[in-house]
Image (spheres, rainbow, N blue to C red):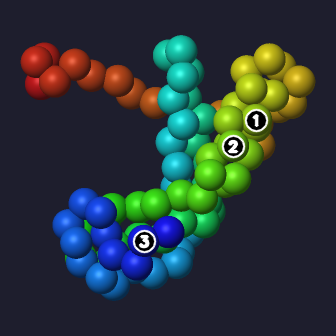
């Protein structure tokens, strides 16, 4: 991975954990404590390919009802034009 942010060019990137929201076919999976690298200047986040593949596999498993998620959330949705 590059040692500078490709979005803003800043050179200080740190390892941290974050929340990742995976969306596909109108469905959503929220994954907590996902490892990433983050730019301390603009906040752009970078994820390892293996991490993203693992999330994709988990989504498929849950969406095909082979696995139950740890918990379910109810999420409010609004169109911007209506607010």
For the residues bearing labels 1 and 3, Cβ distance under 8 angstroms: no
Indicate the quadrant where residue 43 lies: bottom left
Residue marked by disc 1: 57
Q: Is residue 21 left or right of residue 67?
A: left
Q: Residue at x 76, y 35 (%)?
A: 57
Indicate the quadrant where residue 62 lies: top right
Residue 4 to residue 78: above or below? below
Indicate the quadrant where residue 73 lies: top right
Q: Secondary structure at mark 1?
A: helix
Residue marked by disc 2: 53
| Mark before the other along the chain sequence, 2 or 3 | 3
Q: Residue at x 22, y 19 (%)?
A: 79
- Alpha carbons under labels 2 and 3: distance apart: 20 Å
Q: Is residue 9 left or right of residue 23?
A: left
Where's residue 14, x and y in %? 45, 81
| Mark before the other along the chain sequence, 1 or 3 | 3
Residue marked by disc 3: 2
42 vs 50, nearest the viewer: 50
- Alpha carbons under labels 1 and 2: distance apart: 6 Å
- Alpha carbons under labels 1 and 3: distance apart: 26 Å
Where's residue 23, x and y in %? 51, 29
User: Between tags 1 and 3, which lies in front?
Assistant: 3
Q: Is residue 7 left or right of residue 67?
A: left
Residue 75 to residue 31: above or below? above
Q: Quadrant of the C terminus?
A: top left
Q: Residue at x 33, y 75 (%)?
A: 4
Res. 31 visible in picture: yes
- The outermost residue toward the right is 66
């Amino acid at each position: 991975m590059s040692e500078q942010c490709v979005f803003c060019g800043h050179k200080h990137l740190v390892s941290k954990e974050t929340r990742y929201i995976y969306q596909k076919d109108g469905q959503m999976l929220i994954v907590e404590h996902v490892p990433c690298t983050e730019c301390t200047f603009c906040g752009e986040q970078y994820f390892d390919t293996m991490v993203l593949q693992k999330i994709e596999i988990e989504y498929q498993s849950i969406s095909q009802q082979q696995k139950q998620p740890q918990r379910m959330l109810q999420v409010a949705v609004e169109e911007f034009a209506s607010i």
